[in-house]
Image: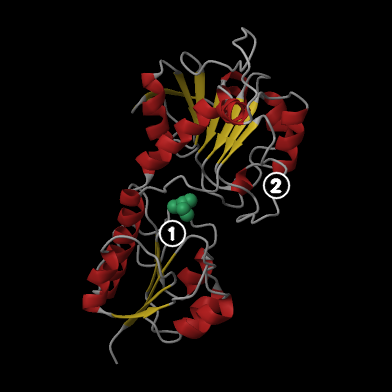
Amino acid sequence: MAQRVLTTRPDLPGGGLDRLATRWDLVRWNGQGKPEPAELHALAAGVSGILCLGNDRVDAALLDAAGPSLKVVALASMGFDAVDRDAAAERGVVVTHTPGVLAETTADLTFALILMARRRLGAARDSLAAGQWDMFRMGDYLGLDVHGATLGVVGYGQIGRAVARRAQGFGMRLLHHDPFAPEDTQDPPSKSVDLPTLLAEADVVSLHVPLTPETRHLIGAAELAAMKPTATLVSTSRGGVVDEDALLRALRGGVIHSAGLDVFEREPMGAELSPLVGDPHVVTLPHIGSATEATRAAMVDLAVDNVLEVLAGRSATTPLPGSAGL
Ligand code: DGY
């Protein structure tokens, strides 16, 4: 029987899937939303590859449902917190993700959040739309400057550096904290500091670490208390990196100035909104960091490359750190 590859969404953009379909038989999940685990497990039986998103749970149950034919799970996402990497490694399944192709687009959105949160653009726009702009007052709609401020990037990988490059254009001073990039660097020029120093000195703290057991609630009550009362916290990484209850208390208590969040501990929210949504000190978006047509197509394309490479017996293009086959 021809090798089969399971795809878990009907709306994967770009032409990548056509390349896959010319080489392997596709088993496509074509429902609304995303597949329930039981449905996914049934479709996975006997496939050689799975191309899925970062919010599909890749655990021992799915890997066992696919069985020994499974060689590769290719995520069309950078984040891999829904993957049981040990279970995949134990079964010799290569897991890949999509670093690189979404860094610039996600950095654009991060910078939009920085500007929106510090200049209170959401609240200003809402007040105009509500018919409350009755005259020019010197004290209305006041925010805090972005130009000349200090940016502290936590996690100085591709996205963190891309945010820092944008900050150079705003004349910002750059600090970073990253145990895996512990040196001062010229790429772009930034001083390496420990986390307490970064929290104490930065006007904007921007989070770019993956969600792992080590980074869960990296920013909690103590870290927020260590920040300046004029500081802004921005996250486009994963919601679990921030203790949201502590963040809400810090914002309401004036411990920090503002926050810009594209990611949440509970996603999606539907109509059951987090209290962070609508708080006047927070700008919130529904996890759209990489959401441009070109970037989403590039993510699918790279995931397809990874499936094709592994099923052809070659090394994956962008395997997860610690993945089988490395
Ligand atoms: C990513 O690639 O990790 C984005 O958050 C979308 O899942």
How packed mark 2 is, by other alpha carbons closer than 10 Å (few <14, some 14-19, many 20 or more), is some
Which label sits on residue 322?
Answer: 1
| Relative to 223, 23 lies left or right | left
Residue toward you, 5 or 314: 5
Q: Residue furthest top?
A: 138
Q: Is residue 225 left or right of residue 303?
A: right
Classify residue 180 as left or right of residue 252.
left
What kind of residue is marked 1? Gly
Say if disc 2 is inside 8 Å of ligand 1: no
What's the residue type where badge 2 is placed? Ser
- Eyeballing the image, is 220 above or below 101? above
Does 130 appear above or below 168? below
User: Residue, x 70% and y 36% (percent of image)?
Assistant: 247
Residue at which label 2 appears: 274
Which of marks 1 and 2 precedes in the sequence?
2
Name the spot of residue 220 as percent of width and height, x first: 70, 37
Cα–Cα gap, marks 2 and 1? 34 Å
Q: Residue at x 55, y 75 (%)?
A: 60
Where does residue 211 sit, x and y in percent of width and height? 56, 50
Colouring of the image: secondary structure
